[in-house]
Image: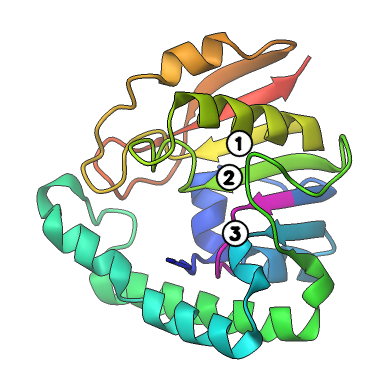
Amino acid sequence: MLVTSRSYVEYEAMFDLTELPASVLDCSAGGSSFTAEAAARGVDVVAVDPAYDLTMPELVDIVRRSLPVGNDMVDANADRFTWKWYGTLQKRDDLRLEAADRFLQDIGEAPDRYVAGSLPELPFEDGRFEVALCSHLLFTWAETFGRDWHLAALRELIRVSSAEVRVFPLVLAGTGEAVPFLPEVLDELDGVRWEIRKVPYEFQTGADEMLVITHS
């Protein structure tokens, strides 16, 4: 299991969050600090991830061990990454370490904000959140989770949101290649509008777009 710790500023850029909605779901959140920092700004925010079923010592261990794993993927696909947004590897590592610390502190102090669960079935009522965010799960791991799983996962995110779903990125992990079934899955979404929107973040070369699904 990989439990990645992304920072609030990364979320701002990945999802082009110029302002925060009243309520947000972060799915699957891993060890990210977005929930802690959004809550500190007064947002009704919940993180969901299967890792939250672990005991606290197990979670601390896996979060710490996950910190260098992403760098191995970057090293293996060095020509597919750009450092324009981060500037340096050290800056990225610092952001991830600070995010991990903030996450571990917050889940210890406010465990109700962190719910064990996983797509395509989430333990929330219809329209529970104004906006649902999904970072580095859908489409990123399209070689592991197939077309039908993606369609079911998107429909579930639509179900638990009342206004909008945002998904980033839209390419395969590591290689940054296109996901062949993305257009087909989007064509099967009923009762919503969708668009692919540029964002002010790019790490994988060409991965600078998010999917925005809006309730009709």
Q: Position of residue 210 (x, y in %)?
A: 49, 33
Q: Are marks 3 and 2 in contact (CB under 8 Å)?
A: no
Would residue 183 be counted in the magenta stretch?
no
Q: Quadrant of residue 127?
A: top right
Q: In which quarter of the image is the C terminus?
A: top right
Dot 3 falls on a residue whose secondary structure is: loop
Asked if residue 20 lies left or right of residue 58, the reply is right
Task: Measure the alpha-carbon separation of dots 3 and 2.
Answer: 8 Å
Per the image, the residue denoted by label 2 is: 134
Q: Where is residue 201 in the image (x, y as percent from the top left)?
A: 41, 46
Per the image, the residue denoted by label 1 is: 166
Per the image, the residue denoted by label 3 is: 29
Mark 3: few/some/many CA within 10 Å (<14, 14-19, 20+) = many
Can you say whether 6 is above or below 145 in the image?
below
Q: Do the residues labelled 1 and 2 touch (CB within 8 Å)?
A: yes
- The front one of 200 and 102 is 102
Amino acid type of the residue that numbered disc 2 sits on in the rendered structure: Cys
Amino acid type of the residue that numbered disc 3 sits on in the rendered structure: Ala
Can you say whether 155 is above or below 119 in the image?
above
Q: Give the residue drawn at x 79%, y 37%.
A: 160
Q: Where is residue 62 in the image (x, y as percent from the top left)?
A: 46, 79
Task: Name which of mark 3 and mark 2 comes first in the sequence.
Answer: 3
Q: Over which residues does the magenta segment extend?
A: 25-32
Q: Where is residue 183 in the image (x, y as percent from the top left)?
A: 44, 14
